[in-house]
Image: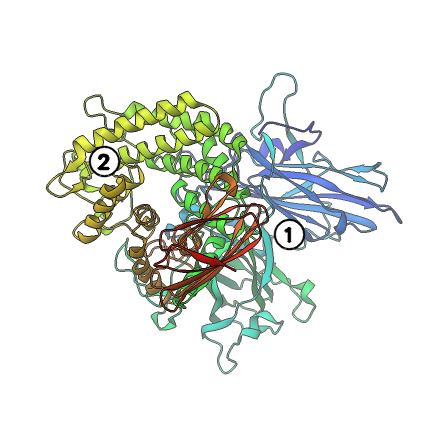
Amino acid sequence: MEQQKNWQARWIWKQRETVTSTEGRHELVYFRRRFEVPEGELARLVVDVSADSRYRLFLNGHSVSVGPCKGDRFTHHYETVDLSPYLRTGANVLAVKVLHFTVSEPFKMGAGGPASIWRANSGAFFFEGSLCDGWGQVLDCLNSDTKWSYFEEQGLSFVPGELETLYVGGVEHMEGALHPHGWAEVAFDDTVWSPAAEISAAYDPTYGQLSPWPLAPRPIPPLYEVERGFRKVMRSEGFGAEQPTFHLLSSGRPYTVPAGGKVMIELDAGELTTGYLQLAVSGGQGGVVKLLSSECYEDAPESAIRRNKGRRDDVSKGYLLGDEDTYIAAGIGDLEGPEGGLERYEPFWFRTFRFVRLTAEAGGEPLVIHSLSFRETGYPLETAAEFRCSDETMHELWDISVRTLKRCMHETYEDCPFYEQLQYAMDTRLQILFTYHLSADDRLARKAIFDFHSSMLPNGMLQSRYPSTFPQIIPGFSVYWIMMIHDHYRYFADLGLVRRYLPTVDAVLGWFEQQVEAASGLVGPMPLGYWPFVDWVEDWRASAGVPTAGEHGPLTISSLQYMRALQVAAELNDAAGRASTAAEYRERADAVGQAIRRHCWSEPRQLFRDGPSAEYYSQHVQIWAVLSQVAAGDAARRLIVQMLEDRSMPQVSYAMAFFLFRALSETKLYAHAFPLWDIWRELAACNLTTWVEDPVSQRSDCHGWGAAPLYEFPAEILGITPAEPGFARIQVAPNLGGLTWAEGKVAIPQGIVQVRWELLEEHGFRIFVDAPRGIPVSLLLPNGKERMLPEAVAYELAVKLQAADGVIS
C-alpha cells in the first residue's frame, strides 16, 4: 500500500526537547485548532487524519473519528472523514486527543501497552484538510502544523494490572484535578497551550526515504459506537435505606456519597460486550471512583490455568475477576448544575465486560455520582443470515455464535477481546468463514490476509499473530493463512487477490520444504524458539498444547499440514495460470504423503501415530490424514470410524472441532457431528452470552473460534456451499441428522440463498431453494441423488428418499 497522495500536512507532536519518553510511561497529548466559518457560507470540510498511536478527533465537542486503523511499521492507516455536518457559523474548533504508547523492546507485558498496536519511538499527529466554500475555493487551510496548539495530560498514568489482560495494556489512573476539563469545547481557554512542533514530512519526494508512518487509506469502515445503559443491578453495598436501582445510574437521578462514605454497586450489561465506559460525577474533591470490568461471576480459580466459573450470572459466587480503572475527583463539578457542569471520565481504550463494579469512596466532601453508562463499539457487521430448525436448543447456539463473532471483530479479528485483542491466524481463518456466511462482507478478511502477509520474516515464515509488537511464531498457523486465501477464492473468485499473495505462499512453502528431512521425507522438529502448538487439550496442557510425541522427534501433524498447504496452493496456482508450479506442489505433496504412510502408519492400531518413532495417537492426526487425503475414500471412512471408537486418544478441543466436522463431512459421516453440539449446549446452560475460549480452562468467556455453528448450520445442515468459485454455481446438500426440518438464509456475493427443508410422512422429503437469479444450483438430496436446477429464482422439490425421482412444483 504505497503513498498515493501528494501530502502537504506535517506530522506534529510536542516540542522537540520533550519528544522522547520513558518506557512504560505512555503519553496522552491534546491538540486544538481554531477556525471561523463565515456568515452565510455553505462550507465543506473533508479531512484525512492519523496519529501514533491512537487518536479520537472532535469537532465542536462532537466525536467524529477514531483511529488510526491498526497497521504496522510499513502500513500506517489514515481515516478520511467528512466533517461538514458538524460545522457551524462563526467559531469552530478541531480538538484531538492522541495517546502514544511508548516503544517496548523486548516487549513488557502490561507496561508495554496493547501488543496489537504498532508505535514508533515518538508520538505523532497528522491532519490534512481545508475548509472550502460551496464552489470548492479554500477558505482556510487546517493542515497539521505549528498553528495547532497542544497540552500534555499530567493526570493520567497507566497501571499494568494483575491479570492476563496484560496484552491489552493495563488500566488507567486519572487525577481529575490535573485534567483539562472541557478541552474539546469551543469555549475552552487554550491560550496557555503551546504551539505544536513539526517533526516529519509525510514522505520524502526526492530520495525515497520513508518516515516512520507510511500512510495508507483505511481499508475497512469505521467502528460503530452506540450509547447503551446497564440493564440491572446485581449487588450493592453501602447505600443504606435508599437502595440503588437501574435508573439511579442511567436516567439522571444522582446519588450522593456522604463525606467519608463508601458504596459499591455491580451492574449487568445483559450480555458480554465491548464499549467505552462513561462516568459522570460532581463535587467530592479527592473522592475515588473505581471501575472494574469483568466477564462473569465465579469462585476463586482452582489454579493458574483452571477457572471455577459455572453459571455466569450467579451473584452468590461473589467473585468478579478484573482490573480497575481509577478516577480521582477534582471537585469542580456543579452539584446543582446541568449535565454540562459535570466531571466526565472515560478510559481511552474500550473495555470488555458483561458486569461492571463501581466502587466510590468520598473524602472530606460529598461525592455525587450522576451516571455510569457505555458506548458499545465494534465492526459494523450487517448480519443477513438466519437459521432455525426442529431442535430449539440449536437456536440459542446460533444466536450466541453471532454475538461471539461480533465481539471479536474490531479493526482486526480478535481471539478474545478481554484478554488479548490479538489477531491469530488459526482463529482468524475460522472467523472469516463465519463472516462470509453471515454477511458476505470480506473487507475485514482482506485486511487480515494483508496483515499476515505483512508479518513475513526474512526466512519466509509468517508470524502467528499480527499486527503485534510482540512477535510469535507457530509454524502451523501459516498453513491457515494459505487456507484463508483459498477460502476467499472459493467464496469470491477474486483472482487478483490470489495473484497478489502467491509469492508469499511460495515463501511459506519454501520454508517448510527446508525443514523436510532428507532421510525420512517428513517435516522435522520445529526450530528452537518456534512454538509447534496444535491444540489446547487436557492431555497436552503441560506441554502448552504440543503433542507428547514432540518429545521424541518430528510431529506427524506438521507433515500433514504442510501436505494440505501444498494441495491448496496447487489449486490456487492452477486458477492463476501457473500450471508448472501447481504440478510441482502436487509432486511435493505426494512425496510427503508417501513418507507419512511409510513412517507414521501403525498396522496393529490401524491409525496414524503422532510421530514416526512414538507410540502416541490423537484424533488430530487422523483428522488431518483425511483432510490431506493421505487416507481417502473407503480408507478414510474406516480411519474416522476407528478414531471415533477409540476413546483412549486425545480428543480435539471444541476449537479444533471445526476440522473434525470437516473430516466427518468428507467421509460422509456427518451424522456423528450432531451429538458434539452437547458441548455447546452445556455451555449455554451456564447462561453464557458468548462462547468460551475452551471448556476446560475457561480462561476467556468470549473467543471467536467457538462460533462454529455459524459455519456448520448453513454449510452442512442447510447444505449451502460454493460448487464453483465465487458461487458461480451453488451446491445445496443438506445433512439431516436427527432433525425433522430446518430453514435459513446464507449471504453470498450475489445476494441471499434461502433453503427450507422438512421430512414428510412415509419417507418423504420436501426442500425449497431460493437463489439469486441466473445462478445454477446443484441439489444433492439425502438419498444421494443429484439434481441440476435450472437458472430460475425459486424451486420446490418433493421426493421419496428411497426413490430416484421427485416432482418439481
Q: Is residue 256 left or right of residue 559?
A: right
Please report the residue visible at 73 percent of the width from the left and 50 percent of the height from the top. 189
Please report the residue visible at 13 percent of the width from the left and 43 percent of the height from the top. 605
Residue 657: image tag: none
Please report the residue visible at 68 percent of the width from the left and 71 percent of the height from the top. 336
Please report the residue visible at 31 percent of the width from the left and 32 percent of the height from the top. 563
Q: Establish if 670 lies above or below 514.
A: below
Q: Nearer the viewer, residue 429 or 553?
A: 429
Q: Establish if 570 lies above or below 262.
A: above
Residue 180: image tag: 1
x, y percentage for residue 76?
A: 57, 34
- The residue beneath circle 2 is 556
Residue found at the far bottom of this picture = 241
- Kind of element beneath mark 1: loop
Residue found at the far left of this picture = 604
Which quadrant holds residue 513?
A: top left
Is residue 474 in sight in this rendering? Answer: yes
10 Å neighbourhood of mark 1: few (<14), some, or many (≥20)? some
Q: Nearer the viewer, residue 430 or 86?
A: 430
x, y percentage for residue 546?
A: 25, 41
x, y percentage for residue 251?
A: 61, 72
Q: Is residue 229 left or right of residue 738?
A: right
Name the residue type under label 1.
Pro
x, y percentage for residue 151?
A: 64, 44
